[in-house]
């Protein structure tokens, strides 16, 4: 299946996923069994949160035949991701204890999902299924027991549900919404940096949406908490699946009602106003002070570019 999209979201890492998720077949055990037995069935393999790939640094392939995957280690979990045309695609989790052994093999690459995206090591339409698998398999690893009664749970619905063996409570994968936004006023915007960022990198502010809160109110709250700026209008720009471990980044620009900064130094190392020209120079890696933007795979880069280069406004 080939899909062409012109949304800004599709330009971010992990966002392009061509699989037909075929959710209506997740409870069809006979069909799933036939797909697992199909010679064209493929699976991505993770050991803990680490991605295993075939090939070399010049040519990587995250899709293994099911027999190839079985040779890497006993699967702790198997999930159905979807159909790539008529080829079924699965996700398999093996023990993280296998990583050191797999690293010694010349025919394998052991990497993390963030590097695969930030360094452009895989095509965009391959990163999407990897993100799907990583988020789903991480959820299984963290939900072995029922939150209602504490009894063990088991997999159902082709890996898209867990059921308690005692009280029969049903548990479903979760996605945590995160707002990521840039406050703008006229020809200026606010960017901040955390101590863990690469040297010289400034980015959009971000934070989790809290229970009972709209996206707009989360944007207003987070900017005020981190930078002390009151916010008026909020406009959605794009979103990005973020499998660390399972978030959805919701990108926006926001109307700053004042300019005085009051930076929360527990959250940020620094925050300040930037001109539109300065942001352009950061995006193009030509800032006179050596400041840089996040890499293009990140939604923060897309938000900064949308405002500074593409002319998006409120």
Image (cartoon, rainbow, N blue to C red):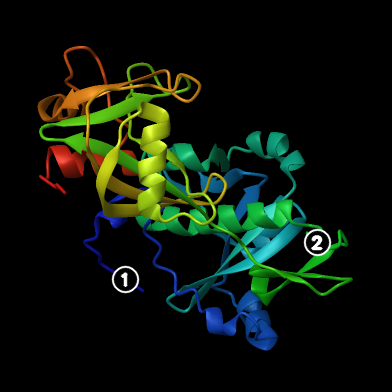
* Residue at x 42% of width, y 45% of height: 59
Q: Which residue is mark 1?
A: 2
Q: How many marks?
A: 2
Whether residue 15 is visible, yes or no, is yes
* Residue at x 33% of width, y 23% of height: 201
Give the x, y percent position of residue 156: 72, 74
User: Between 255 and 275, which is closer to the camera in this rendering?
Assistant: 255
Whether residue 297 is visible, yes or no, is no
Callout 2 crowding tier (Cα within 10 Å): few <14, some 14–19, many ≥20: many
Label 2 vs 1, first from the N-terminus: 1
User: Between 188 and 162, which is closer to the camera in this rendering?
Assistant: 188
Is 206 drawn above or below residue 172 in the view shown? above
- Cα gap from disc 2 to disc 1, whole angstroms: 39 Å
Callout 1 crowding tier (Cα within 10 Å): few <14, some 14–19, many ≥20: few
User: Between 222 and 165, which is closer to the camera in this rendering?
Assistant: 222
Element type where label 1 sits in the image: loop
With 224 as the anchor, is 40 left or right in this view?
A: right
Give the x, y percent position of residue 74: 77, 55
With 60 as the anchor, is 89 left or right in this view?
A: right
* Residue at x 59% of width, y 59% of height: 174
Is 174 drawn above or below residue 116 in the view shown? below
Using the rendered view, name the quadrant where residue 205 is placed.
top left
Q: Which residue is mark 2?
A: 146
Which of the two discs, 2 and 1, sits closer to the camera?
Answer: 2
With 300 as the anchor, is 194 left or right in this view?
A: right
- Taking the view exactly as shown, the residue that stands out farthest to the top is 289
Give the x, y percent position of residue 238: 30, 54
């Amino acid at each position: 299946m080939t899909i062409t999209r012109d949304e800004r979201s599709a330009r971010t890492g992990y966002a392009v996923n061509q699989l037909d998720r075929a959710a209506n077949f997740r409870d069809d055990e006979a069909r799933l069994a036939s797909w697992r037995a199909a010679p064209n069935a493929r699976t991505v393999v993770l050991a803990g949160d680490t991605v295993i790939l075939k090939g070399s640094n010049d040519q990587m392939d995250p899709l293994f035949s099911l027999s190839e995957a079985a040779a890497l280690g006993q699967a702790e979990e198997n999930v159905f991701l979807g159909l790539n045309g008529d080829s079924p695609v699965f996700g398999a989790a093996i023990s993280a204890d296998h990583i050191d052994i797999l690293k010694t093999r010349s025919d394998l690459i052991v990497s993390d999902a963030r590097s695969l995206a930030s360094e452009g090591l895989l095509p965009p339409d391959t990163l999407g299924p990897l993100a799907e698998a990583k988020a789903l398999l991480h959820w299984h690893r963290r939900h072995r027991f029922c939150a209602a009664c504490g009894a063990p749970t088991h997999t159902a619905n082709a890996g898209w549900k867990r059921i308690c063996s005692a009280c029969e409570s049903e548990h479903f994968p979760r996605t945590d919404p995160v707002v990521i936004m840039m406050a703008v006023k006229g020809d200026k915007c606010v960017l901040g940096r955390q101590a863990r960022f690469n040297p010289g990198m400034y980015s959009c502010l971000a934070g989790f949406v809290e229970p009972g809160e709209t996206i707009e109110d989360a944007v207003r709250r987070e900017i005020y908490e981190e930078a002390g700026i009151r916010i008026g209008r909020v406009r959605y720009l794009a979103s990005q699946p973020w499998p660390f471990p399972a978030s959805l980044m919701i990108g926006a620009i926001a109307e700053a009602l004042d300019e005085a900064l009051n930076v929360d130094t527990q959250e940020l190392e620094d925050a300040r106003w930037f001109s539109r020209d300065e942001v352009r120079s950061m995006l193009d890696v030509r800032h006179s002070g050596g400041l840089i933007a996040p890499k293009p795979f990140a939604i923060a880069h897309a938000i900064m570019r949308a405002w500074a280069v593409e002319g998006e406004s409120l």
